[in-house]
Image (spheres, grey):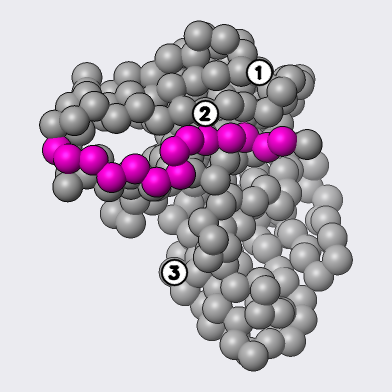
């Protein structure tokens, strides 16, 4: 069985602060895929990043960066110099085994960025 | 490019009525997913199609729920009879083919209220 845990239910920061959203996963698959999605107040789910289990390179995209550590089964997401527009619920998700594409989602972390 | 299109965006119905939710995936995508989002259970998979064939329907709550994908460009999720506990946001998502599990793109969702 697969499981994704996002222990932080809600985080509140002031604009320009850095913030890290934690994600811990469990799977028995040797090949698996990790994802982050953003759900702004408007409600849609926006894809942010995909990682496969063989690629532990960290990734940076503008103010966003992701740290994947297989040794601790974690895939954390950092927003640098947060902005009010970053306010949203962020979901970490996992799919296991190539071809088994359905996502198991964490419970989400609500990020509020105050001006 | 058109994204995943869901209709209706909002649906209010009375308990016992039949409800049909519709989804048009992104052209060229061959996997289609139906997810449900509630406060209590978060985001959970209902059913997953690959090449129009249901692959995993283990998340379909009970016989009142049924899903079809008659062709590559259309899917329906039907609830008959509807109950108040079915109130939720229902998301359809699609992903492109590939040797790896590709990211899913989500529609805007259908907010269903059963009174």
- Same chain, marks 2 and 3? no
Instruction: Specify few, some or many for label 3: CA neighbours under 10 Å numbering under 14, 14-19, or 20 or more.
Output: few
Report which residue position mark 2 lands on: B23
Q: Which residues are magenta?
A: B2-15
Instruction: Specify few, some or many for label 2: CA neighbours under 10 Å numbering under 14, 14-19, or 20 or more.
Output: many
Closer mark to the observer between disc 2 and disc 3: 2
Report which residue position mark 3 lands on: A9
**Residue at the image point whose x is 46% and y is 44% from the top:** B9
Q: Quadrant of residue A34?
A: top right
The circle on residue B30 is 1
In front of the other: A41 or A21: A41
In front of the other: A40 or A11: A40
Q: Is residue A11 above or below residue B83?
A: below
Residue A16 location, x and y as percent? 74, 87
Instruction: Specify few, some or many for label 1: CA neighbours under 10 Å numbering under 14, 14-19, or 20 or more.
Output: some
Residue A91 location, x and y as percent? 55, 55
Q: Chain of mark 2?
A: B
């Amino acid at each position: 069985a697969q499981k994704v845990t996002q222990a932080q239910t809600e985080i509140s920061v002031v604009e320009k602060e850095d913030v890290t959203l934690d994600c811990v996963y469990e799977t028995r698959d040797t090949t698996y895929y990790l994802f982050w999605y953003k759900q702004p107040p408007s409600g849609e789910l926006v894809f942010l990043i995909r990682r496969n289990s063989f690629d532990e390179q960290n990734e940076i995209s503008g103010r966003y960066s992701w740290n994947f550590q297989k040794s601790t089964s974690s895939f954390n997401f950092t927003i640098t110099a947060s902005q009010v527009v970053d306010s949203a619920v962020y979901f970490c998700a996992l799919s296991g085994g190539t071809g088994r594409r359905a996502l198991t989602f964490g419970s989400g972390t609500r990020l509020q960025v105050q001006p | 490019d058109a994204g995943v299109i869901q209709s209706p965006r909002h649906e209010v119905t009375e308990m016992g009525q039949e409800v049909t939710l519709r989804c048009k995936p992104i052209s060229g995508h061959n996997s289609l997913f139906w997810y449900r989002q509630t406060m209590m259970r978060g985001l959970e998979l209902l059913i997953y199609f690959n090449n129009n064939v249901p692959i995993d329907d283990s998340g379909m709550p009970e016989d009142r729920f049924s899903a079809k994908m008659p062709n590559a460009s259309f899917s329906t999720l039907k609830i008959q009879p509807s109950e108040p506990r079915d109130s939720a946001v229902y998301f359809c998502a699609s992903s492109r083919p590939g040797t790896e599990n590709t990211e899913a793109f989500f529609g805007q969702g259908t907010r269903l209220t059963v009174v």
